[in-house]
Amino acid sequence: MNISLCMIVKDEEMNLKKCLQSVVSFVDEIIIVDTGSTDKTKDIAKDFTEKIYDFDWCNDFAKARNFSLEKANNDWILVLDADEVVADFKKKELAKYIGGNDRTVGRIKRINIFEDNIGSKRYIERVNRVFNKKHYHYEGIIHEQIISKNKQNYKIINVDIIADHIGYTKEVIKNTDKINRNLKLLKESIKKNDKDPYLYYQLGKTYYMDKRYEDAYGNFVKALNLDIDTKYEYVQDLVESYGHALINTERYKKALELETYDYFYKEIIDYKFLMGLIYMNNGLFEKSVNSFISCIGDKEGKIEGLNSYLAYYNIGVIYECLGFIEEGIYYYQKCENYEPAKKRIDNLK
């Protein structure tokens, strides 16, 4: 198996060493494309590779990505960002995948660590990161996507690589100003193509991350009013993000309209959990409890705990608020070490 790691970086001295240390023993070549660092990023990269190239930044992530692909000696590519640290890499399994799947794209598991008003949470997703550059390249100036060179649809396969993504914790966002950068680039993209729902979806997600929920809501609406295809993976997240924006802007009754997506997503835990929240905020407590109960099991959601302690916690809140204290405590206890549940139990005793 010969595989090249391709990365684009700028001012990543905080993260780059951890990233490269985590992956250097698994890849055959490391390509670093620097887009204008003024810190020690390139000095850190030199400890891991001689293949460091400068790229004049032109507000186009796809061009920078494709430049990195051109510099790779191997056809098979793994792409990481500097704020991603490999936690698990099954090299034998990856070699089997590479051996006979050059027309497919491999998806690594990325665990995003983020903070909300309760504390840190882990958001789990699959992202396309392993591919053969003879058949694929990048398109899109921001949130660039892997596209088949012949413009055909392609098959995706999950591969045995897990990476922890720390890029959107509060500290890193503050230091890199990612949100303002992304807002600017997305707005420029929309000026060129105002009929692309994916761009409005990403703009809404960026506003949501900045807790500008009204702006997030408006852009999710624009995306949903355009020609969307529910088969695209991002559409599920668009619907769910729209639902959370409705809750955060207190449009609880309007949020009930998301029941129309039950046909597409009724087996998806993230959707069922969202509907539980929507029913709870509309006082439909029986339907809410049933939705949360349907989340519980072995199947994982994108956010850690949706299938266990987070569902139990919300059921406990409902019973407590309805005055059924014993039932509330019962469900809080099923949350085990979840701190908010422990605090509610202490307050009720």
Image: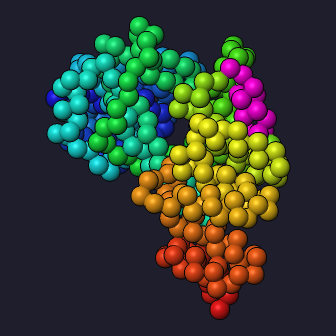
Residue drawn where x is 66% and y is 38% of the image: 261
Residue 107 seen anywhere in this rendered image of the structure: yes
- Residue 129 within the segment the image draws in magenta: no
Circle count: 0
By secondary structure, the bulk of the magenta-drawn segment is best described as: helix
209 left or right of 77? Answer: right
Q: Quadrant of the N terminus?
A: top left
- Residue 224 within the segment the image draws in magenta: yes
Residue drawn where x is 66% and y is 31% of the image: 201
Residue at the bottom extreme of this rendering: 349
- Name the foreground residue: 78 vs 44: 78
Q: Position of residue 93 (x, y in %)?
A: 20, 39
Q: Position of residue 18 (x, y in %)?
A: 35, 48
Q: How is the image coloured?
A: rainbow
214 left or right of 103? Answer: right
Residue 166 seen anywhere in this rendered image of the structure: no
Q: Position of residue 226 (x, y in %)?
A: 72, 22
- Name the foreground residue: 263 vs 343: 263
Residue at the top extreme of this rendering: 150
Q: Quadrant of the C terminus?
A: bottom right
Q: Position of residue 86 (x, y in %)?
A: 33, 46
The answer to whether 294 is drawn above or below residue 326 in the figure is: above
The answer to whether 322 is drawn above or below residue 33 in the figure is: below
- Name the foreground residue: 123 vs 42: 123
- Name the foreground residue: 308 vs 202: 308
Residue drawn where x is 70% and y is 43% of the image: 259
Magenta span of residues:
215-227
The answer to whether 291 is drawn above or below residue 312 in the figure is: above
Residue drawn where x is 23% and y is 20% of the image: 74
